[in-house]
Amino acid sequence: MPETEIITFGCRLNAFESEVIRRATAKAGLRDAVIVNTCAVTAEAERQARQAIRRARREHPEATIIVTGCAAEIVPESYAAMPEVDRVLGNRAKLESQSYLPEGATSTDLAETASHPVSGFEGKSRAYLQVQQGCDHRCTFCIIPYARGPSRSVPMGLLAERARRLVAAGYREILLTGVDLTAYGADLPGTPSLGQMVRRLLAAVPELERLRLSSLDPAEIDGELWRLLAEEKRLMPHLHLSFQAGDDLILKRMKRRHSRAEAIAVARRARALRPEVALGADLIAGFPTETEDMFRRSLDLVAECGLAFVHVFPYSARHGTPAARMPPVPDPVIKERAAQLRAAGAAALAAELASRVGGETDVLIECPGKGRAEFYAAVDFTAPAAIGAVRPMRLIDSNRNSLVGVPVQ
């Protein structure tokens, strides 16, 4: 395998950074290597990464295997001890070309790759733009701030420059990514909010057709972002909200900064401002001390907020976090509650899709016969269309997971 293969786990920020890694390895001349970009959110994510590492060694016995990402940042010695692994890199080092030079080699010609924009995403129809990194909050279940460090924002001028490059490369849609997106700007001069940044970005890059946001903390959505949701058609009508739970005591024990009532209010406000909006959320099943009644309030939140896109995380204790010291819920109960949340999410998605039949939407073509609606739903179609193009379609049918569209003539 002369080329470098990158295996990515976890969030969209990791996906963005894998493209930075791809550029860094090319600049360093790295070949015959497999890089595993890990995630530390759950024990399952780590298990899958270890499985991928062992599979990579079986399939590529002569390749150099490099492990990086959040799990490698937190427990580097654990991955270094794996016989399949040749090198372990932390989150900062993985973005630098120098990290991929042969052992002992040096070069003064390799600038830090992370400081340069990514102009393309292999196999992707939309582009990711990192606007923020790290997190200043300490939710009791989360290990990520220890892997990513404090919140740091990318200045507006750089964001506009990078967005222009992506649009010039042919991307019609850009997704803004970060660890704590709504924390954007707190560390910059003038402390601009996320909404102010989004408004300036859209004004600075008028040729950008579609802008999408990744996960938002419901406690930090600013007034300017609400106004944009109502007024700016280039901002896609889809919000993914970091709810995590629907019970107030569990939210308090998680050290979240919103209540159940505030979560419901955010969903209602979004629909009032943009009736066509689709909502998604992260929910954790089986957080320590969660009773059946507490879980029921999380389950009910799916219907009460109309959550069409539910990401369910069975609680996974992360060593060193406060939640790991709380009285646990038995594993079989966690598994069952996660299954109930997923079933509720699947039913909500099916209902959401059925309600869209008969309408029209612009569809971003992701691959032959498949695309993504403005409100994020998957759309299947049979007409020929170029990958990366945006096509208006009429929605004529739905199934459990996607809509069926035909091009509007």
Image (cartoon, helix red, strand yellow):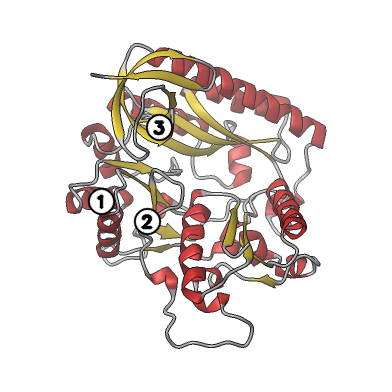
Tag in front: 1 or 3: 1
Q: Residue shown at 24%/52% (left/top)? A: 201
- In the rendered structure, which disc, 2 or 1, sits on the residue that comes first in sequence? 2
Label 1: which residue?
Answer: 196
Q: Position of residue 49 (x, y in %)?
A: 69, 53
Between the C-alphas of marks 2 and 1, the distance is 10 Å
Any part of residue 136 in sight: no
Is 3 left, or right, of 321 in this rendering? left
Is 312 left, or right, of 369 in this rendering? right
Q: Residue shown at 21%/52% (left/top)? A: 200
- The kind of residue on which mark 2 rests is Tyr
Circles 1 and 3, Cβ within 8 Å, touching? The answer is: no
The quarter of the image holding the C terminus is top left
- The kind of residue on which mark 3 rests is Val
Tag in front: 2 or 3: 2
The quarter of the image holding the N terminus is bottom right
Label 3: which residue?
Answer: 266
Label 2: which residue?
Answer: 184
Q: Is 93 above or below relative to 403?
A: below
In this rendering, the count of numbered labels is 3
Between the C-alphas of marks 2 and 3, the distance is 19 Å
Q: Residue shown at 28%/58% (left/top)? A: 165
Structural crowding at the residue carrying mark 1, measured as other residues with C-alpha within 10 Å and reported as few (<14), some (14–19) or many (≥20):
some
Structural crowding at the residue carrying mark 3, measured as other residues with C-alpha within 10 Å and reported as few (<14), some (14–19) or many (≥20):
some
Circles 2 and 1, Cβ within 8 Å, touching? The answer is: no
- The kind of residue on which mark 1 rests is Gln
Q: Is 114 above or below relative to 242?
A: below
Any part of residue 43 in sight: yes
Secondary structure at numbered mark 1:
helix
Q: Position of residue 202 (x, y in %)?
A: 22, 48
Q: Is 277 above or below relative to 398?
A: below
Which residue is more in the foreground, 185 or 58?
58
